[in-house]
């Protein structure tokens, strides 16, 4: 009979607190129960965890209890949610799925919640719904920021007319393929960047081992709904602050902080869940106080990841400009999946989490994309306090990825692309235009939040294949 093997992860799954109790339990099992059936031993260890008083005087299992009881006493108690939540405004409520509303209803019951809003592209996610905005009191929620920290949109446009695109489709197709990388791909020769000189890479233990991978991935894009695409910008407003009204060739990119942000998010989410445990329905909303060392560490790491995401986009657009042999007329950039220190209308300083929502403070420029065949909108924020100075970050999903894959065919996707004159490199059925809400309706729901300065219409789209 093979000797039993029990791991620390298995004991944590049972509910054992991390630390000496786990080591003692493993030692006791290997010394005294190594020939027993594994499930029998796990059941026994669970009974010890749930009823330690029954084993205090046990010569063998009492050794586990001796480490377990102090550890349990030191564990923070589960923090209850408020019975009633803060009221909040939901834009386009009739088009928002039930799961997203339920998640927001939980978030506004957090003891640290101050104000909230739900954007018209909202759909269910983890922790905060995608499209959720939550202002908190001196605390940051790592999973309220999200895994792809600082994910953003970046638009550059050139003094080239629309017919340049139609005359040079094959050339632009090649430029996209040679100057972008997605998912697990990495660019052959990543460019250096000043961000790698930042002291955080040396001072924060979580960042030290991530620097090399971050260098290899800079200038690349993630998978899922991330893209780089050529299209046509139409500027309407005389006072847009970007360029004269008219039509221009443009590049639009959507991506985030790659593996760097994902690792930071997991580490500090796990830490938050240990230090501020919440009921099951709210566990991904555990927070770190900004008056704690862990909270300050996360804030520095989050800020770095956001700046890294921006650098990735700037590299992408620099490569596009070099390949085109042109300098862009202007750049519009905005991000989501981030937390900002801001002041509310009454002067209170809060931490504003925008999970799949973008800043729309008065005069703030942004780009809100539609889908691979529908227009995106260049916007200027109106500074609406009810939305906590926020707007949507896109059209928002109508179908989950699984539903899209199971209900949309390749034939349907090709037909829609052809009808709109769009060429797709990579991509999948989960990102088909039919999987997204009607961007025109979404924009109508938030007309009090942003004014439209122009549009971007995709024509050549590259995504992860």
Image (spheres, grey):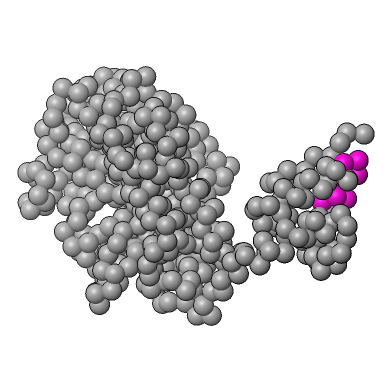
Using the image as rendered, state which of residue 126 and residue 299 is in the foreground. Answer: 299
Q: Residue 100: x, y in percent?
A: 49, 62
Residue pictured at 51% horizontal, 58% vertical: 272
Image vertical order of residue 425 relative to residue 21, above or below = above
Write down the quadrant of residue 48 in the picture.
Answer: bottom right
Labels in figure, total: 0
Q: Residue 186: x, y in percent?
A: 41, 25
Using the image as rendered, state which of residue 429 and residue 449 is in the foreground. Answer: 449
- Residue 94 showing in the rendered view: yes
Using the image as rendered, state which of residue 349 and residue 162 is in the foreground. Answer: 349
- Residue 253 showing in the rendered view: no
Tell me the quarter of the image containing the N terminus.
Answer: top right
Residue pictured at 14% horizontal, 46% vertical: 235
Image vertical order of residue 432 relative to residue 212, above or below = below
Write down the quadrant of residue 130 in the picture.
Answer: bottom left
Which range of residues does the magenta coloring cover?
A: 34-42
Taking the magenta stretch, the answer to whether it contains residue 39 is yes
Image vertical order of residue 282 relative to residue 199, above or below = below
Q: Is residue 281 left or right of residue 195?
A: right
Q: Residue 263: x, y in percent?
A: 48, 42
Write down the quadrant of residue 75 in the picture.
Answer: bottom right
């Amino acid at each position: 009979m093979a000797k039993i093997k029990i791991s620390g992860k298995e004991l944590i799954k049972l509910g054992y607190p991390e630390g000496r109790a786990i080591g003692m339990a493993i030692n006791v099992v290997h010394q005294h129960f190594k020939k027993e059936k594994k499930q029998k031993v796990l059941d026994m260890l669970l009974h010890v965890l749930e009823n330690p008083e029954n084993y205090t005087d046990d010569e063998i299992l009492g050794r586990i209890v001796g480490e377990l009881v102090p550890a349990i006493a030191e564990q923070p108690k589960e923090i209850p949610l408020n019975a009633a939540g803060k009221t909040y405004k939901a834009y386009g409520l009739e088009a928002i799925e039930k799961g997203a509303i339920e998640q927001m209803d939980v978030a506004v019951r957090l003891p640290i919640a101050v104000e909230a809003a739900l954007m018209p592209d909202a759909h269910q996610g983890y922790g905060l719904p995608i499209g959720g905005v939550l202002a908190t009191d001196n605390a940051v929620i790592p999973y309220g920021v999200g895994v792809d920290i600082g994910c953003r949109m970046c638009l550059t446009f050139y003094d080239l007319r629309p017919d340049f695109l139609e005359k040079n489709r094959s050339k632009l197709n090649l430029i996209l393929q040679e100057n972008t990388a997605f998912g697990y791909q990495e660019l052959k020769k990543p460019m250096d960047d000043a961000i790698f000189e930042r002291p955080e890479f040396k001072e924060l233990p979580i960042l030290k081992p991530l620097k090399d991978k971050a260098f290899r991935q800079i200038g690349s894009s993630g998978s899922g709904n991330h893209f780089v695409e050529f299209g046509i910008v139409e500027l309407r407003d005389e006072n847009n602050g970007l360029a004269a009204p008219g039509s221009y060739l443009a590049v639009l990119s959507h991506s985030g902080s790659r593996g760097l942000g994902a690792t930071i998010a997991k580490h500090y989410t796990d830490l938050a869940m240990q230090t501020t445990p919440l009921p099951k329905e709210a566990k991904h909303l555990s927070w770190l106080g900004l008056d704690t060392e862990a909270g300050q560490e996360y804030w520095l790491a989050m800020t770095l990841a956001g700046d890294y995401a921006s650098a990735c986009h700037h590299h992408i657009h620099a490569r596009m400009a070099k390949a085109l042999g042109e300098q862009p007329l202007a750049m519009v950039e905005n991000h989501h999946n981030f937390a900002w220190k801001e002041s509310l209308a009454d002067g209170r300083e809060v931490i504003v989490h925008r999970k799949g929502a973008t800043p729309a403070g008065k005069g703030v420029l942004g780009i809100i994309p539609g889908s691979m065949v529908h227009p995106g909108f260049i916007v200027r924020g109106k500074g609406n306090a009810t939305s906590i100075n926020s707007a949507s970050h896109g059209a928002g999903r109508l179908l989950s990825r699984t539903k899209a894959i199971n209900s949309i065919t390749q034939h349907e996707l090709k037909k829609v692309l052809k009808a709109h004159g769009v060429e797709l490199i990579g991509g999948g059925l989960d990102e088909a235009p039919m999987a997204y809400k009607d961007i025109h309706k979404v924009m109508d729901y938030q007309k009090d939040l942003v004014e439209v300065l122009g549009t971007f219409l995709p024509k050549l789209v590259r995504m992860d294949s």
